[in-house]
Amino acid sequence: MNEIKITTVPVILAGGIGERFWPSSRSSRPKQVLPLISEKLMIEETIERVAPLCDENIKPLILTGEKIAKPISDCLSGKYKFDMIVEPVGKNTAPAVAAAAVWCKQKYGENSVMLVVSADHAIRPIEKFVSAAKYGVELASAEKTLVVFGITPTRAETGYGYIELSGEKGTKDGVRSFSIDKFVEKPSAEKAQEYLSSGKYLWNSGSFIWKTSTIYEQFKKDMPDLFADMQKLEAKNCSVDAINEFYRDCIKESIDFGIMEKAQNVSAVEGVFEWDDIGAWEAMVRIHGKDESGNTKTGKNIFSAENEDCIIVNQSKNSVAVIGAKDMLVVNVDDAVLVISRDKLPELKKYLAETKKVLPQDLY
């Protein structure tokens, strides 16, 4: 028998400036174009991660916001091939996936398989990600199933959603797949510890795989109003005006709440790779490690003495010296410095609203 060729289309969700990484991130330099986990930009890391899954004639589709489309495009042009949908307004992930599904259907056909990933995840090694993704693509193509990447928890994390497993489905090349009982919202510390100890839960990575026709059917069933907007977008061939109209009219909703938590045909592929959601400065500790005094340093020309449990980031041409500090974050970029107690980081957005009243607006 001839092997059926599967067209895999990476869909990269790259919306949002990433305010929690201020002063490094801003509208002219969003988080996706920062070298937070290596010397490469995060969007470059993402494109290179999915490249092994693409045929030569397939281009990743990037969905991003109007304010940050140009800096993302500028840093990729000439180095990578890609398509882009520019969202005039953010409406969360369900409309983004819906618009991408219409695009994929029109350009690659309804039998194409969408690999939906985020531009702000750290994943190592690439080979293990590719292996898990290939298995997920096979499942999504052979069955009418929505596949989610589940990550084995390494700590009682309260900032992630969880997936409750109902049984193992199969395995390939050391990668296991599971049936899913339900999705669980971000838990309390007590519940998170319970999930970790039970071995019956995976983190919801927010990365998905499905056949374009399958997600179409799911939108029609579970989000009929959004599906009607998809049909209008398809009728107008995904033109710029049609995309703007789509985002003007469509509902604001997450793909998790709008589709995944309602769907019955969901499977999980276990990601046997290191994974982290790079959502705020605290992720630097997990990515870059810490010294014997609990300090994390990233960047050049940093002097650190008698500090304890500090994060020191230098992304400027200047030198940075931090002495005798405890539980502090220090971030230095060419035109701004942030010094904040780490226990205040969850409130950073609140403080940013105050700084905007007195600091130059081009810092945001």
Image (tube, grey):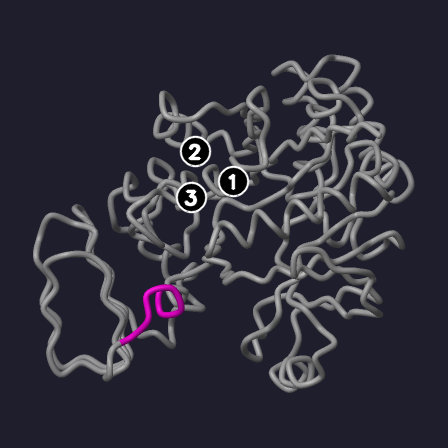
Alpha-carbon distance for marks 3 and 2?
A: 18 Å
Q: Residue furthest front?
A: 1
Q: Is 149 placed above or below 362 here?
A: below
Q: Secondary structure at mark 3?
A: helix
Q: Nearer the viewer, mark 2 or mark 1?
A: 1
In depth, the one of 272 and 219 nearer the eye is 272
Q: Nearer the viewer, mark 3 or mark 2?
A: 3
Q: Amino acid at mark 3?
A: Glu
Q: Please name the residue shown 13% across and 83% down the image.
A: 306
Q: If you read the primary sequence from the N terminus, does the residue marked by circle 3 or circle 1 appear first? A: 1
91 to the left or right of 81: right
Q: Residues within 10 Å of mark 3 (few under 14, many from 20)?
A: many
Q: Residues within 10 Å of mark 1 (few under 14, many from 20)?
A: many
Provide the residue designation for mark 2.
68
Q: Is 214 placed above or below 346 here?
A: above
Provide the residue designation for mark 3.
45
Provide the residue designation for mark 1.
14
Q: Main secondary structure of the magenta part?
A: helix
Q: Residues within 10 Å of mark 2 (few under 14, many from 20)?
A: many
In depth, the one of 50 and 249 nearer the eye is 50
Q: Amino acid at mark 2?
A: Ile
- As for residue 80 lying within the magenta part, the answer is no
Q: Nearer the viewer, mark 3 or mark 1?
A: 3
308 to the left or right of 84: left
